[in-house]
Image (spheres, rainbow, N blue to C red):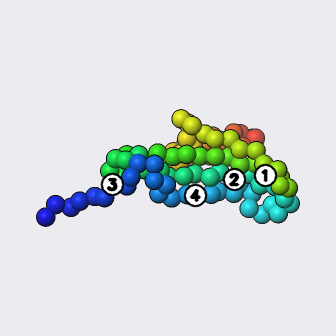
Amino acid sequence: MKNKTKTPKSDTVLATHCFNFDPLNHGGGAVQLTTRFIANGDPITKDEGIFLNQEFSLQSYGNSASINLCGTMLTPKILRELANELETERNKLNT
């Protein structure tokens, strides 16, 4: 018997992840990145079948501003590269 992989319907939100950049700040403000993992209608594999919608949300006492990211996503690879570059620049200041 063949192993069938179920293919989710296109545009189905498969998961949502919210990251708070400063979880210890309880002063009424927040900077968050919300990522929605969405099926594109193809079988889901390690590298295909899902696209992302991301939104930065800046909140302050009931007011908010959002930036929707389209085309360029903050992927784990890009975030690791950013972290490495920031660490390199910071380490230069120690000398």
Among numbered discs 4 and 2, the one appearing first in the sequence: 4
User: Viewer-nearest of labels 1 and 2?
Assistant: 1
Between 34 and 80, which is closer to the camera in this rendering?
A: 34
Residue on which the image places disc 1 = 59
- Compared with residue 88, is residue 4 higher up or lower down, i.e. above or below? below
Residue at the (82%, 63%) spot, across then down: 26
Q: Residues within 10 Å of mark 2 (few under 14, many from 20)?
A: some
What SS does tag 3 mark? loop
Which amino acid, mark 3? Thr
Residue identifier under label 4: 17
Q: Three-letter amino acid code at disc 2?
A: Gln
Dot 1 or dot 3: first in sequence order is: 3
Q: Residues within 10 Å of mark 1 (few under 14, many from 20)?
A: some
- The quadrant of the rendering that contains the C terminus is top right
- Mark 2–mark 3 distance (CA, rounded to whole Å): 30 Å
Which part of the image, by quadrant, shows the N terminus?
bottom left
Q: Position of residue 78 (x, y in %)?
A: 55, 42
Which residue is tagged 3?
7
The label shown at residue 32 is 2
Separation of disc 1 and disc 2 at Cα? 8 Å
Looking at the picture, which amino acid does disc 4 mark?
A: His
Left or right relative to 11: residue 3: left
What amino acid is at disc 1? Gln
For marks 4 and 1, the one nearer the N-term is: 4
Looking at the image, the residue that sits furthest to the left is 1
Measure how far apart labels 4 and 2 are at the Cα level.
10 Å
Disc 1, disc 2: CB below 8 Å? yes
Does the rendering let one see residue 91?
no
Q: CA distance from mark 4 to mark 1?
A: 17 Å
Point out the frontmost of discs 1 and 3: 3
